[in-house]
Image: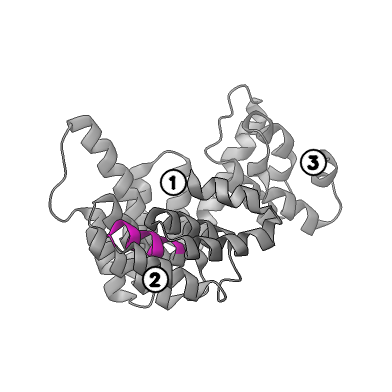
């Protein structure tokens, strides 16, 4: 049980338990992890604090809440020590976000980029923060955005400083899809795919964006030529089936169905039913 692991004499076991606190239901987290917050080892205390920060702790004992407050302060101090690196400020922003301090989270990410413009996760997290901020503001003010906004600006800056970051090109593709700029999104997803050839998620979004851009036939052929590389990924096989059905391309549908049948060992009858309906 969790209690047995929390009381373990082995520090590595206690540290492992501290790092999976998010798996516990929120009302039980502080109760189960209170002892870890006063662990003799600082690494365990701050790991537990990181997983408990931002949890709904109504009804918790006053002493346990005090232990959490002290451990969170230690966590902040640890992040401050590492603040000469972009990663340290990113960690501070994550903690601030968990505690509901959005402004502090954004400021930490801005500082992370200032200190280390080549640490791409800072741009990803800041762009996401701007996306959420913009969505909230748009809802409150009932307005429609036009032109380049802060999310796009930070992604463009990130790509400029980190042109070989597949994750940034992928994030830009997602942004462009949300803005219904499909053709530019295709280019971004293609760039991400080329930079990380083994990432099936990047490939999937590239093929899907081709379809949205009216290039379904090209997408279908691209999937066929990529299946071996991606070890006959079931997600791509299903996408191939969908595109084949959309194009009423029975030979291609049969091709993907044979791939799927080898994986699922399903019968021919279901093939005809799914194609016809």
The reply, left or right, for residue 78 in relation to residue 261 is left
The reply, left or right, for residue 242 in relation to residue 214 is right
- Residue 178 in the magenta stretch? The answer is no
Residue in the image at 56% along x and 35% along y: 55
Residue 103 vs residue 218, the one in the foreground: 218
Which of label 1 and label 2 is nearer to you? 2
SS class, disc 3: helix
SS class, disc 2: helix
Local crowd size for mark 1, using a 10 Å CA cut-off: few (<14), some (14–19), many (≥20) = many
Residue 258 vs residue 226, the one in the foreground: 258
Q: Position of residue 264 (x, y in %)?
A: 69, 56
Q: Residue furthest top?
A: 59
- For the record, the magenta segment spans 204-214
Which residue is disc 2 drawn over?
192
Q: CA distance from mark 3 to mark 1?
A: 27 Å
Q: How many marks?
A: 3
Which is more N-terminal, label 3 or label 2? 3
Q: CA distance from mark 2 to mark 3?
A: 41 Å
Q: Position of residue 133 (x, y in %)?
A: 29, 43
Q: Position of residue 187 (x, y in %)?
A: 29, 69
Q: Is residue 83 visible?
A: no
- Residue 169, by quadrant, is bottom left
Q: Is residue 192 visible?
A: yes
On residue 2, which mark appears?
A: 3
Which residue is disc 1 drawn over?
96
Which of label 3 and label 1 is nearer to you? 3
């Amino acid at each position: 049980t969790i209690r047995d692991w929390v009381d373990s004499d082995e520090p590595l076991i206690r540290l492992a338990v501290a790092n999976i606190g998010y798996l516990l239901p929120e009302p039980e987290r502080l109760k189960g992890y209170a002892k870890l917050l006063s662990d003799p080892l600082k690494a365990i205390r701050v790991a537990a604090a990181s997983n408990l920060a931002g949890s709904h702790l109504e009804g918790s004992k006053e002493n346990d809440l005090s232990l959490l407050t002290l451990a969170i302060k230690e966590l902040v101090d640890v992040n401050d020590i590492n603040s000469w690196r972009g990663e340290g400020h990113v960690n501070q922003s994550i903690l601030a976000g968990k505690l509901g301090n959005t402004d502090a989270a954004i400021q930490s990410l801005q500082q992370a980029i200032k200190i280390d413009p080549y640490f791409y996760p800072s741009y990803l997290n800041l762009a996401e923060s701007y996306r959420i901020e913009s969505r909230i503001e748009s809802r409150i003010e009932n307005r429609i955005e036009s032109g380049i906004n802060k999310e796009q600006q930070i992604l463009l800056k990130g790509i400029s400083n980190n042109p070989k970051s597949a994750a940034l090109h992928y994030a830009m593709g997602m942004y462009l899809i949300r803005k219904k700029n499909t053709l530019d999104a295709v280019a971004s997803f293609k760039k991400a795919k080329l930079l990380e050839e083994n990432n099936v998620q990047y490939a999937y979004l590239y093929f899907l964006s081709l379809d949205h851009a009216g290039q379904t036939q090209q997408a279908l052929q691209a999937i066929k030529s990529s299946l071996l590389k991606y070890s006959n990924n079931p997600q791509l096989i299903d996408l191939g089936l969908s595109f084949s059905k959309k194009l009423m391309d029975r030979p291609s549908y049969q091709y993907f169905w044979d791939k799927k049948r080898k994986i699922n060992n399903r019968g021919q009858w279901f093939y005809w039913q799914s194609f016809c309906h």
